Image (cartoon, helix red, strand yellow):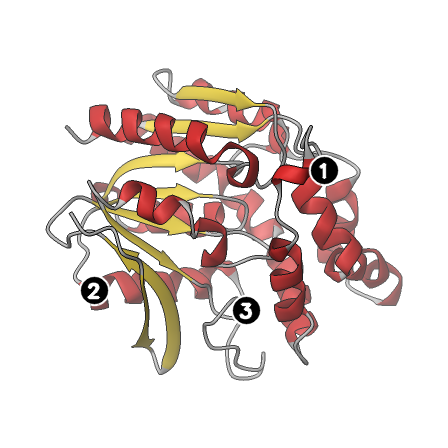
Amino acid sequence: MDSAVHHRTATVDGLEVFYREAGDPRSPAVVLLHGFPTSSHMFRRLIPALADRYHVIAPDHIGFGQSAMPAPGRFPYTFDALTDVTAGLLEHLGVDRFAMYVQDYGAPIGWRLALRAPDRVTAIITQNGNAYEEGFVRPFWDGVFAYAEAPGPDTEAPVRAALTPESTRWQYVNGVPDPSLVSPDNWVHDQALLDRPGNDVIQLALFRDYTANVDLYPRVHRYFRDSRVPLLAVWGANDEIFGPEGAKAFGRDLPDAETHLLDSGHFALESHLETITGHIRDFLGRALG
């Protein structure tokens, strides 16, 4: 079957949404939801590795990647609003049921999709996509939570540091035993998009909204218990943003959750593509039949 990756755009609520797509639309759908500070670019190698068996869709969130970047006065940069656009894209594409791969920011977007329509989610793969307070690694999150609680010049300076080239590179190589496996194209690409005029204001708005995701966790846990959704956690165990305790915690509400801790960091696909792909194919083969 053709595993070619297509690069497309769709208009959702008047906004241009970029997405990568591969595989037969008649096959089971798998939606890949990226994190900060990247885009669907993080899935560029995973998409063709799944497309022989699945219909793979990887959008760029609004304000990220190749999707539209309206000024904050024209778009409310909240995780609810990003979810609205993602749901609109899936409706536009006629995707009624889907498995999802969530990482970092992709997780709170994915959890909202599931809470809105639990029966539509067939399975979940979480790769350092958090749903439990145990997953937050300090001191990384101290600055974000302080800024969200009391935005101002004093609390803004530490979170602005997360928008620098040094921080972007750190997210990719920290915790990776052999950093030479991680292409520098990743952080160069991401940083160029972060450095666009006005993008800093967008990222700060999402930092301020992040506590809304934590507030949602009890509902997410209830969804896990009620749905018993099949879940695979493939986790960079050395991640100093979302630590391995976050991966283990899924088993509390989903006793059948499958967990694999990898010797990698936040963007584990860069160093462990083949391992993660193998786990996904095995898991989805069992979960989706």
Q: Position of residue 68 (x, y in %)?
A: 47, 77
Q: Position of residue 37 (x, y in %)?
A: 61, 57
Question: Is residue 112 something one can see in this rendering?
Answer: no
What mark, if any, has residue 93 been given in the picture? Answer: 2
What amino acid type should be assigned to the residue bearing mark 1?
Answer: Asn
For marks 1 and 3, give the CA distance. 28 Å
* Picture quadrant where residue 14 is located: bottom left
Few, some or many C-alpha atoms within 10 Å of disc 3 (few <14, some 14-19, many ≥20)? many
Sequence-earlier tag: 1 or 3: 3
Disc 3, SS: loop
In the picture, the quarter occupied by the C terminus is: top left
Disc 2, SS: helix
Which residue position holds label 1? 174
Which residue position holds label 3? 77
Q: Position of residue 172 (x, y in %)?
A: 66, 45
Few, some or many C-alpha atoms within 10 Å of disc 1 (few <14, some 14-19, many ≥20)? some
Q: Position of residue 48 (x, y in %)?
A: 32, 47
Sequence-earlier tag: 3 or 2: 3
Front disc: 1 or 2: 1
What amino acid type should be assigned to the residue bearing mark 3?
Answer: Tyr
For marks 1 and 2, give the CA distance. 37 Å
For marks 3 and 2, give the CA distance. 23 Å
Q: On the rendered structure, is 144 left or right of 134?
A: right
Nearer-the-camera pick, 188 or 141: 188
Question: Is residue 10 something one can see in this rendering?
Answer: yes
